[in-house]
Amino acid sequence: MNYFYIIIIVLLNIKFLNATLTLKGMAFIMNAYEKVYREMIDEFNRYSKDNNLDIFLEFNFLTENNSTYDVTDYGNVINSLLTKKSTKYDMYIYFDAFNDLFAPHFINLKEYLDDDFINTFPPEFIKRSYINNSLTGIPCFLCTNVLYSNRELLTKYGKEPPKTWDELIETSKYILNEEKKQNNTDLIAYNGVFAKDSEGTLSVFEFIHSFRESKYSPYPSIRDQETKDSIKMIKKIKDEISSDKIFSSDIQLTFEKLNTGGALFLKCYYLGIIPQYITTALPGKKEGISGSILSPGYISVSRYVDKDHQKAATEFIKFYTSRDTQKKYFMKTNIFSSVSSLYDDEETCQWIDCDVVKQASPYIFVAYDPGEYTQEYYYAKFRQYAYEYIFENESISKIIKKMDDLKKVYYFTFKNCDSSVGLILSNVVFITLLIMCLLLIFFVINRKYLYNKFLPNEFWIISMLGSIFILGTIFTLYEKLSVTKCFLNITIFTTSFYINIIPIFNQLIVNFPKTNKISDWFKKRSNRYLFLLIIIFINIGLIGLIFIKPYTIKNVLITDGENFQICNLNSTWSQTISRIIYYLQIFILLILLSLIFIEWNLTAIFFDIRIITPLIFTDLLILIIYRIFNYINIKNYIFNGINVFFVVFFISLSNYIFTCLLKVYYLIFNSKKNSIENMIEKLKVNEMQFTPEASTNISTNERIELNLDNNNSSSCTYNSNRNSHSNIIMKKVNYNSPFGLLMKYHYQNTISN
């Protein structure tokens, strides 16, 4: 019995010991701030114990001392953890630049925090953390760069801290010249901090920020004139009062000069009140506008931890971001708070320069979305292009284009914007379409010209319309690509292709050298329409199968070039269906070529066959070339567009021309006195016939003269030695074999029953 009580007591103790919930957080902070964070966490654990919250908090702080991470690397670490749905950490502290990237992985804090608490923070900070109507983070601190102005030198020459960049240049020039007179040649006017790291990127962003038209204007876009002017100002400051070496130095030079007083103006993140320097917000294009960017840090809760941990994490957020905690642990240690009311607190403003935050307000987000690039890569390229102008004298227009091209997607337009190629090609298409339509209308209106011995009039018109419709595919290349355009492209092209080709296919079946059930079936007008509809429905059905795993839009990213988009099929299923659609076209063309070979010598369609042949060969060749180009990694949106244009335009044009020639041929030769049948008979007199009887009637040395017109103005002769030689070879062929039967049909000039 005693053992039973002992077990109960042990179990109760275990339960009691496990009652405390352990929270884990992760943050990247500067070395100087680690101590105050540790003190604040200890304070929370005491607060938790005193208020029976049963929460114990642990934080993993990454600093320059215990890791090799910088801010960007830290963002990648968090992203990796969140992407894997890791439960290792309950909370994360991060900078606002990562809001959009991290937001899907965080809970909606509106479910845990009341409105009164949320409203204690500046609305622009709260608005920034609302992603898809979900409050994903609470602002917990602010970072900003400031201008430290040498108090002694400014007082000596009766100058004030500059409020504009022009004032900074003017004051610097004056004091530098005066100091040189006193042999002070080591004085630095302005450090810049345009190093090849994240600090350099921020320096560029700050200058662009400082050229806003007004205090409440949004952050300038890359193509705005403000962006050009700001980067020009960077170069102007470097050339007039600094140097490449000083401007490209890292933050260490700044710390050195802050300690020695060897600089007139220094840009640095806020380090508190330094007696020998006057602290102000960074200058701007004009007075009242600052280059200082308020960068809030946010604390968020992972959606991948359980509800108990989520609720416990919000208890820490309320403690951490409360006015009392912020005032006690942060303002006294030179960390700007996200609680705006503290900047009107007299006691607080004795420890920290409240005017700096007020001058830097309002919060304006740097709206550069890296898109498919990592933020690290995008910012590095942006910085690189800016430096090409600042340090390497590249033209401003070129580097602005490069910056814009990082995210910009190029495509053909009907305007002469980025390239005139799209406009030129569209004009070519419109003119070609106009000519095609007018010519077809001419034939339809003048019915006397509709005589066509090969194709019935209605099917000739259908075939012509098909070649016109093919050309319409080109318009899917224009403006921004979409999934709908991808489906329209393949649907219009393939359907129009069959509308153009199938009437010819039907007629060749009808003209098969030996009458059969299939050719008899195709002789009926209704059956020809039915077959055309069947082919179209099969084609559309195959395209419909792609909807199971539809097209996606793939961005083709070109380093230092022009990005563009292509239709992409990711799944094996859709790729297979796409191949079937392509090879069905090839299969139809190969059947057409086979029928052309079989019917090559039929008298009734002797010239028609020779007009159709280049049409089919052209289509086959272009489709094969296009397929080959699809396997080539094209890195230029113009070449990619021209590739598609070439295929569509030349298939449409060649098919139209050769189909039209069927009509023109009859118009020309119907004006002759002799009928086409007589003309062919003259050309084919005594030509070899693939029958044993015919071969015995041809003399090996006979020469036959053919008169091609009624006036006997010209003639041509055929050497029948060739026919005799062919007959000798044909005698050795087995007529009952597939090859022999094929050759028999090939040399047959009439349709047999």
Image (cartoon, helix red, strand yellow):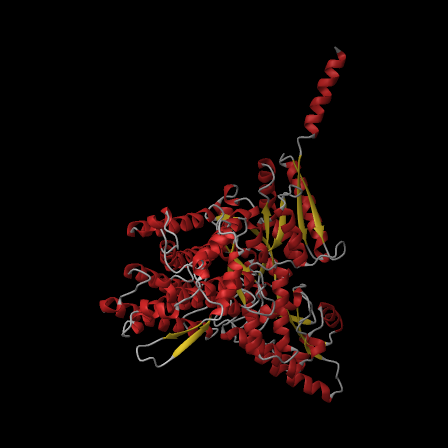
Residue at the top extreme of this rendering: 1
666 above or below 61? below
169 above or below 10? below
Residue 738, percent across and down? Answer: 50, 50
Quadrant in the picture for the N terminus: top right
Residue 503, percent across and down? Answer: 35, 57
In terms of depth relative to the viewer, which is nearer, 568 or 159?
568
Residue under the image location 43 percent in, 57 percent down: 693
In terms of depth relative to the viewer, which is nearer, 599 or 291?
599
Residue 65, percent across and down? Answer: 76, 56
Give the total of numbered labels: 0
Residue under the image location 62 percent in, 82 percent down: 171
Horizontal relation, residue 671 to residue 140: left or right: left
Residue at the bottom extreme of this rendering: 181
- From where the camera sits, is residue 303 visible? yes
Horizontal relation, residue 65 to residue 491: left or right: right
In terms of depth relative to the viewer, which is nearer, 416 or 649?
649
Residue 430, percent across and down? Answer: 36, 71
- From where the camera sits, is residue 281 visible? no
Q: Quadrant of residue 718?
A: bottom left
